[in-house]
Amino acid sequence: MQYILIFLLVISFYFLNNLFIKKKLLPNFSGEAHQLFVGEKNIPLSGGLFLILFFVIFFFKIKIILVLHLLLIFLLGISSDIRSQITPVLRLFFQAFIVISFVITSDLSINSTRVLILDNILLNPYYNMIFVSFCMLILINGTNFIDGLNGLVITYYLFILLIILYLHTSFNLLIDESQIKILIFSLIFLLILNFSNKLFLGDSGSYILGLFFGYFLISLYSLNSDLSPFLIVLLLWYPCFEILFSMIRKFQLNKSPIYPDKSHLHQLLYYFLSKKLSLKKNLINNSASLMINFYNLIIFALCTINIYNSSYIIFLTIINIFIYIFLYIRLFKFRYRLSGK
């Protein structure tokens, strides 16, 4: 029955999205920092709409609190997509309200990080709630920060699901296999439309994926506490480090950390490839996205060698960070040396 429903949802949304394109509903605004690299205006920001329909249909009966908060974060994202007058500061406030409400009502907590000092702090339920909410906010906004190339966010989370499914098969992780499979199918559908310039995720789609995967991976660790908690950290390292690195970079440049710019790693890689390859914008866009995510897939695959060894996974994470910083510096110098800005 689930597969019939997902098939009907996919077919229905395909025609609905074509209507959005024809009627120019939920259009992107070409020229904004996170929509800069395609150059076509008539691409609807409808990815979030598909995701919220998916979660309402398949998760509402079993995870009503999750779906209600996904709906709230979707509405907040839509307000950004339609360029409402909500300022970034006010949007962050609403994000925090939604996330804290979700953490409290769903009783979401992190009970062990294998860092003694932090674990002692997390024994206090109030501090635990603050810590989990902070992590969720970082992930939500980090997901939005990396949503600047076709398929970058969707493929990243698709690879996480594939790794979890592999771990379920190989290590008998406790998961709902059928739900993961239909979510994989849904993301593949979105990815095809995104790569072919039929839709963008929009802020609404990024917010939904960030909130859901934060919940999903914390719950996964709660059910499989023999895993290293740093496995979850590694799986989410890219969007989380992207926002933390971006905040540090902007503070050093005396810029507000909550406003977008054009100096994220994926944007610099796009610029580098555009100067090195004689291809259309869309092909360069897709190529840069795939390069980043296939690197992440390799790291994810390496972490499956020993999913219980925290020292090994911390080592991989540190290597990731050094590689990121090294590449960022090289690409940043290339970008601004050529532009002269």
Image (cartoon, rainbow, N blue to C red):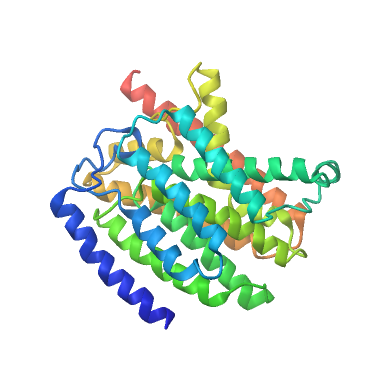
- Foreground of the two, 29 or 123: 123
- Foreground of the two, 327 or 77: 77
x, y percent for residue 115? 81, 46
**Which residue is at 25% across, 46% downward?**
26
In the image, farthest residue toward the left:
22
**Which residue is at 52% across, 67% downward?**
162
x, y percent for residue 316? 66, 51
Q: Is residue 295 visible?
A: no
Specify whether 236 is left or right of 339.
right
In this view, 330 is above or below 297: above
Q: Quadrant of the C terminus?
A: top left
Specify whether 46 is left or right of 63.
left
- Foreground of the two, 231 or 304: 231
Q: Report the number of discs.
A: 0
**Which residue is at 42% across, 49% downward?**
74
Q: Is residue 303 visible?
A: yes
Q: Quadrant of the N terminus?
A: bottom left
x, y percent for residue 24? 17, 48
**Which residue is at 48% across, 19% downward?**
255
In this view, 52 is above or below 251: below
x, y percent for residue 231? 67, 57
In the image, farthest residue toward the top:
254
Write down the quadrant of residue 195 in the picture.
bottom left
